[in-house]
Image (spheres, rainbow, N blue to C red):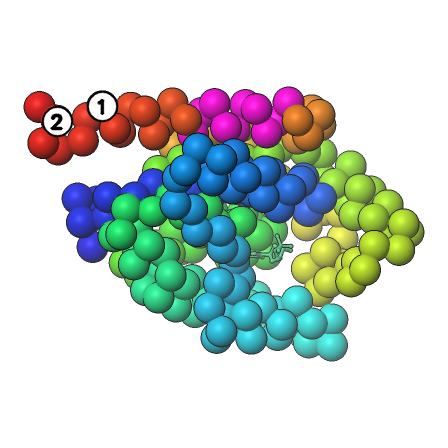
Amino acid sequence: MSGQELSGLFITLEGVEGCGKSTQARLLVEHLEGRGVEVVLTREPGGTALGERLREILLDIGQTGMRPETELFLYLASRAEHVAHVIAPALKRGSVVISDRFGDASVAYQGGGRGLGVDLVRSLNETATSGVKPNISFLLDLDAGEGLGRLDGRIQDGRPGASRDRIEREAIEFHRLVRQAYLEEAAREPGRFVVLDAGSHVEELAREIASRVDALLEERAGTHPGDD
Ligand code: TMP
């Protein structure tokens, strides 16, 4: 699938646990829908029926002793389905697709956190995604301990369904490696990544994300084939 065939805009949100990306994804959807833009909000692992089943397995605390390689292939399997059945078709229709996590999460969590190596994961991502890449990726950067603290705060508040899943239960050192790998990916692709301080106020972050996306949409509208 070449970039030309995919006329939509692909946006991803990434970051360590508790960074607030799901809230930001929702706020961005509201902002864009308010402007009359067609938006598809989706997530990984998940986004398809099969992907959601894989998500259950991946996050199940009962799945003890899963090999890092097995974990990686399950995330990649979810991604392959997600791209083929949801993301690429929506981009072909010209929609804006917002994914709460995508390939960079495997680079950070399995490549960095699990130590499988970022080069290996990047190359397997190419196969899983058929080369479909986000146009812009927001990295909501946060100290790993602070993120886990936020998560535990939500659990203590008794928020329905809130409890640490299989990945969230990993030691703080794992989550620090994940953050480091995310920051390294962002430094490697500064044209795609926007790194934001996830410690900022929710509204402030939402405004920053919305203005970046608006700018990108305007830029693309101005350079649309046929306009020149
Ligand atoms: P979520 O909590 O953001 O919904 O993501 C589910 C968990 O899966 C989260 O702990 C991050 C982890 N994850 C990976 O380890 N690798 C991946 O490729 C993806 C997409 C998520």
In this rendering, does residue 174 appear at all?
yes
Badge 1: residue crowd in 10 Å (few <14, some 14–19, many ≥20): few
Which secondary structure dominates the residues rendered in magenta?
helix
**Three-letter amino acid code at disc 1?**
Gly
Nearer to the camera, 171 or 7: 7
110 relative to 20 in the view: left or right: left
In this rendering, does residue 76 appear at all?
no
Residue at disc 1, CB closer than 8 Å to ligand 1: no
Task: Quickly name the residue at label 2.
Answer: 227
Which residue is located at x 68 percent, y 59 percent? 167
How many numbered marks, from 0 up? 2
Q: Give coordinates of residue 127: x percent, y percent.
A: 31, 61
Nearer to the camera, 109 or 60: 60
Task: Quickly name the residue at label 1.
Answer: 222
Q: Please check the rendered image and state whether residue 157 is part of the magenta-colored stretch, yes or no.
A: no
Q: Give coordinates of residue 26: x percent, y percent.
A: 58, 43
Residue at disc 2, CB closer than 8 Å to ligand 1: no
Up-down relation of residue 163 to residue 7 (above or below): below
Which residue is located at x 78 percent, y 37 percent? 146
